[in-house]
Amino acid sequence: MSRNEVVIQHIVMPSGIVEGDIPLYNRSSDGRHFPIDLRKGEILDLRSHFNLLPIRKLRENTETGTIFLRLHFKGSVSVLVTTYGTETSEDAIIPSDGECCVIDGSEGDLLGIVITAMTDSVLESGEFLCRPKSRKDVHLAHVICTYRREKELQDKLGRIGSFLDKDPDMKEHMEIVVIDNGRTIKDIERGNVRLIGSPNYGGSAGFARGMMEACRDGKTTHVLLNDDDARLDPEILFRTISFYTLLKDGLSDTMLGGTMLLLDRPCEAHESGAVFEGSKPHSLKRHLDLSDIRSNEELEREESIDYFGWWYLAIPAETIRKNGYPLPMFYKMDDVEYGLRSPSRKVTMCGISVWHPSFSSSYSASGTYYAHRNDLVLLACNRMLDRRNIDEFMERALLDTACLRYPSTSATMKAIEDFLKGPDTLFRMCLDGPAEIEGYEYGDVGELRVGLRPGKETRAGFGFRKYTLNGLLLPSSGDVITDFDNMQTKDFYRVGKALYIVDEKKGTLCKRSLTKAIFQTIGLHILRRKLIRNMGRLNEEYGKASSRYSSEESWKELFGEE
């Protein structure tokens, strides 16, 4: 490749990152890998999530100019180019040198290609590229915060290492910074990988440490935050670097976030950016089936974004220097708070996605504690804590009681009590490690099913359900089998036992308890009154403390650095 060329993205094929052949690379989902043998007349349809070109966002954000498609092949092929958004398409015959112009003034959101073999041919590889007048120097620090997930980390580093070995030029533009909160990782420092052991002050502390380490050398231009259990195709690292290399002048504050796909449903989007409304976050683009081209069009439609999850988020180093670091919230809601605090442009791109386990599979009372405690922290830091969102918050807490999730309600009550202690106490709690929260007892689903009796179908209005504590004041009418995603109180009306299934083998059995329900309902109302009585003071204290505890000086103090 000549020095004045920049590859925007490669044509990619699946590499075993998730199980099975999925139609996010090649629409026929036949598990092919380069080199690909094509018989005369055979078609390779690459109008798929990871091989679609996001042309509109490239035009809006980068100095690509004319974009070219280059294929490396033996034989003779033709290419059908389809532009989505205007329903236009055109044929192009690839010349003998393997290159054709695929975009020159055409309109649309996405561009896809279909390759047809004119003779028996072999497709070896391909890429979209441009010839910009200038490029920006980019050095990406890929920060991975991990805690006792050695296998996931080794798999990820191995896949990225193999990718970098094939592209020496990319090695010059990135390094991997591993923050080991468990201090259990050994023998991974090699080449571009730097290992830093750190005390377990939580994920927010791990990412803060990584951001600080990355920004110290003065060479890093962008920092990528990436969960240790998020599986990624290394190609998206390449695309991230290319995006910032071609970024337009005046857009240097742009954050680039990745779409989260569900590991157990690998074609389904869980979130592609999110907004914070009322007192809680809302995922954008949820449940889109990205094996469908029209869903990818929907994915590309612009929406205002407040924050990105840290399964994959690239942040300009200069943005970090201006806005500071995460707050010491241990984990949960730290990414939401940081996004709300950062006025940067927030962009997603089709084809920059990672697979992450479903959050319901990791549901815990401890998670509820941190999510609800830090939700209150976020509101107060932004001086948004008021009677309306306190009432919304309490409704969510009472919902757990109505659904027999008593450990979660107890965790919420502790969360409120700790929040009321103020920022100087709360933000130093991370030094004590994970909070001690009484959790659920998990067991074998098959054994827990024994003796459950199906519930009778009963109907009752919301008001009646509310005043009977969702039927707890009435005799039980049966049991229910569900999962932690179920937040419908009507499904738990007069239920005696609720079996919550986490996966095929694991679950927990929750039994109705009138005593716990009454105690928690009264306790939450008392805490509600305390929150309302103190909300002005809490907004002021947390609002003032936010900038102090997100500063580098504060983090150095927490880490015991001079």
Image: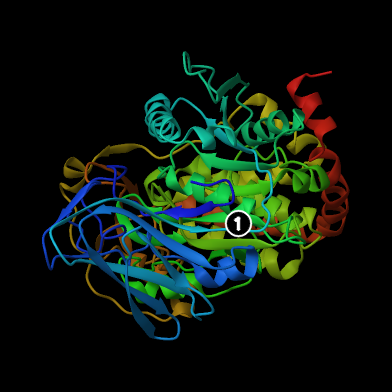
Residue that protrudes farthest toward the top in the picture: 187
In the depicted view, which residue is nearer to us: 68 or 303?
A: 68
Position of 488 relative to 159 (above/below): below
Identify which residue is drawn at 50% across, 65% down.
Answer: 67
Give the x, y percent position of residue 142: 57, 37
In the depicted view, which residue is nearer to us: 21 or 97?
A: 97
Give the x, y percent position of residue 77: 23, 64
Occupied quadrant, residue 173: top right
Position of 410 relative to 113 (above/below): above
Q: Quadrant of the C terminus?
A: top right
Residue that protrudes farthest toward the front in the picture: 96
Give the x, y percent position of residue 280: 61, 62
Residue that badge 1 annotates: 522
Q: Is residue 362 left or right of residue 16?
A: right
Identify which residue is drawn at 65% across, 55% down.
Answer: 255
Identify which residue is drawn at 22% across, 41% down.
Answer: 505
Indicate the amino acid at tag 1.
Ile
In the depicted view, which residue is nearer to us: 525 or 473?
A: 525
Q: Secondary structure at mark 1?
A: helix
Identify which residue is drawn at 63% across, 62% down.
Answer: 62
Q: Is residue 163 visible?
A: yes
Q: Is residue 383 left or right of residue 280?
A: right
